[in-house]
Image: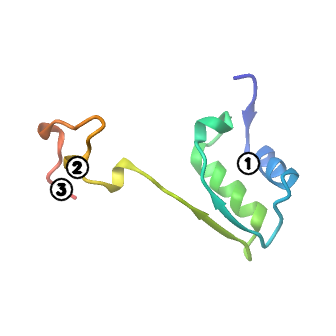
C-alpha cells in the first residue's frame, strides 16, 4: 500500500464523488477496498457522518460473525467445541 486514508481524505473523496450535507446514502463496501484506513471502520463511519451531516441519512449492511450463531456456520463449519454457551 502506497498511501493511507484518514478521515480528512475520506471526506474529501466523498465530497469529490458529489456527496453533500443532507444526502441519504446506502453504503456497502469492503474496508480492504479502501486501502489502509487510519482508525479502521470507526474512521470510515465518522467520515460518512461528517460528509452527510446531522440532516443526512446513512444506511449500511452490517454483516458480522459476532451477531450470529456459530452452530449455523457452514463455510467453513465451526467445530462444536468452539461454540460458546453464553450469548
Residue 4 appears at what percent x and percent y? 73, 32
Residue 18 appears at what percent x and percent y? 86, 58
* Residue at the farthest bottom position: 55
Disc on the earlier residue, 2 or 1: 1
Label of residue 24 in the image: none
Position above or below: 31 against 48: above
Q: Nearer the viewer, residue 82 or 7?
A: 82
The residue identified by callout 1 is 7
* Residue at the farthest top position: 2
Q: Nearer the viewer, residue 76 or 37?
A: 76
* Residue at the farthest front position: 74
Quadrant of the image occupied by residue 9: top right
Q: Mark 1 packing: few (<14 Cα in 10 Å), some, or many (20+)?
A: many
Q: Mark 3 packing: few (<14 Cα in 10 Å), some, or many (20+)?
A: few
Q: How is the image coloured?
A: rainbow
Q: What's the CA distance linking mark 2 and mark 1?
A: 36 Å
Q: Name the secondary structure under disc 3.
A: loop
Dot in front, 3 or 2: 2
The residue identified by callout 2 is 72
Disc on the earlier residue, 3 or 1: 1
Disc on the earlier residue, 3 or 2: 2
Amino acid at each position: 500500500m502506497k498511501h493511507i486514508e484518514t478521515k480528512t481524505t475520506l471526506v474529501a473523496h466523498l465530497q469529490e464523488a458529489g456527496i453533500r450535507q443532507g444526502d441519504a446514502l446506502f453504503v456497502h463496501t469492503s474496508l480492504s477496498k479502501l486501502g489502509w484506513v487510519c482508525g479502521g471502520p470507526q474512521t470510515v463511519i465518522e467520515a460518512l457522518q461528517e460528509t452527510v451531516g446531522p440532516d443526512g441519512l446513512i444506511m449500511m449492511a452490517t454483516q458480522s460473525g459476532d451477531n450470529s450463531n456459530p452452530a449455523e456456520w457452514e463455510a467453513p463449519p465451526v467445530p462444536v467445541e468452539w461454540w460458546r454457551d453464553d450469548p
